[in-house]
Amino acid sequence: MKVKATVNGAISLVNAIATWKGATLGITAKVEATVSTSEGKGIQLELDNQNTSSRLVNKVVEFAVPKKELEKNKITISLQSEIPTGYGLKSSSAISSVISLACHKIFKPNYTDSQVLNAGIDASLATKVSMTGAYDDASACYFGGIQVTDNKARKTIRSDKTPANLVAVVFVPKSRKRGNVKQLKVLDTVFERAWNFAKNGDYWNAMILNGYATSAVLNSDPKIISSLIENGALGASVSGNGPSIAAIVKKDNAPKIKKVFSEHEGATMLAEINNRRAEVHEV
């Protein structure tokens, strides 16, 4: 049997590390996994990006596929990703979710969404790819739209579609330097306030407050956030633990935001908003 699954990336509105509560928004950069089974045993990986964690991929398969099936099937996984790895754009959540989805389609066809997400989250925790399991990230990658979550309870608190007239302008700095992520906990009351904004649907103010708090801790310059707002961004923030910075803007205003980023060393990408859920089908 052979299946193909597609899951999209996402950007942060509120970082969950300080409080275990996060908010995330889906974007169209995607990950595709083709998973096939044949007689034999073991997992064979064909990864298009050497930065992809093979430990994470193998662990997802362990959690998603029943043990007795693992012992009598050779599983071949081919992975193609448009999401830069290690920049806070949820590549790990997208990869773990896409592999879990494909494996569930083959081995547990009556799966639920939560079973798919939990296998990816458990694998992320087991391999220490994520400190919280990133239920917020996995949810936005899998369901699209905006997802406001309690990661400890693995519960969605609020879910919304994002208006189609908006785009995400994402800056990927040349330097991959990050600050000490654990220091985010010092500002837990600020992140709690940002999350409450998101819980009440005030997403862009949540993103801005998160942007100032994360940039102050994670070696980004808070002045960039200010400059993005001055030039018409509705919301702007470091995404995840950085170092990427994302701005949400009306489509006709994207060139002004790109100009702000052009003053810094790195690449700028334009990403459509994704409101669609993950897809999987037999091939």
Image (tube, rainbow, N blue to C red):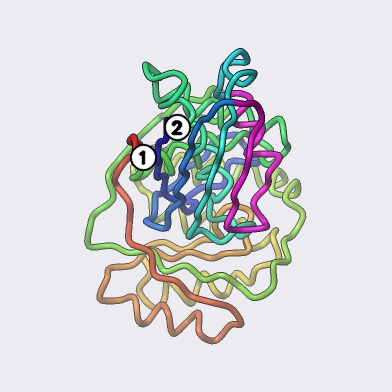
Residue designated by label 1: 278
Identified at 69% across, 67% down, the residue is 176
Quarter of the figure that contains the N terminus: top left
The answer to whether residue 167 is magenta is no
> Which mark identifies residue 218?
none
> Which mark identifies residue 101?
2
Q: Quadrant of residue 127?
A: top right
Rendered location of residue 106, percent (x, y):
43, 25
Q: Secondary structure at mark 1?
A: loop
Tag 2 and tag 1, C-beta contact below 8 Å: yes
Front residue (pair 33, 68)? 68
Identified at 59% across, 30% down, the residue is 74
Rendered location of residue 38, percent (x, y):
53, 30
The magenta span reads 40-63
Rendered location of residue 275, percent (x, y):
29, 47
The answer to whether residue 62 is magenta is yes
Identified at 57% across, 57% down, the residue is 48
Identified at 55% across, 24% down, the residue is 64
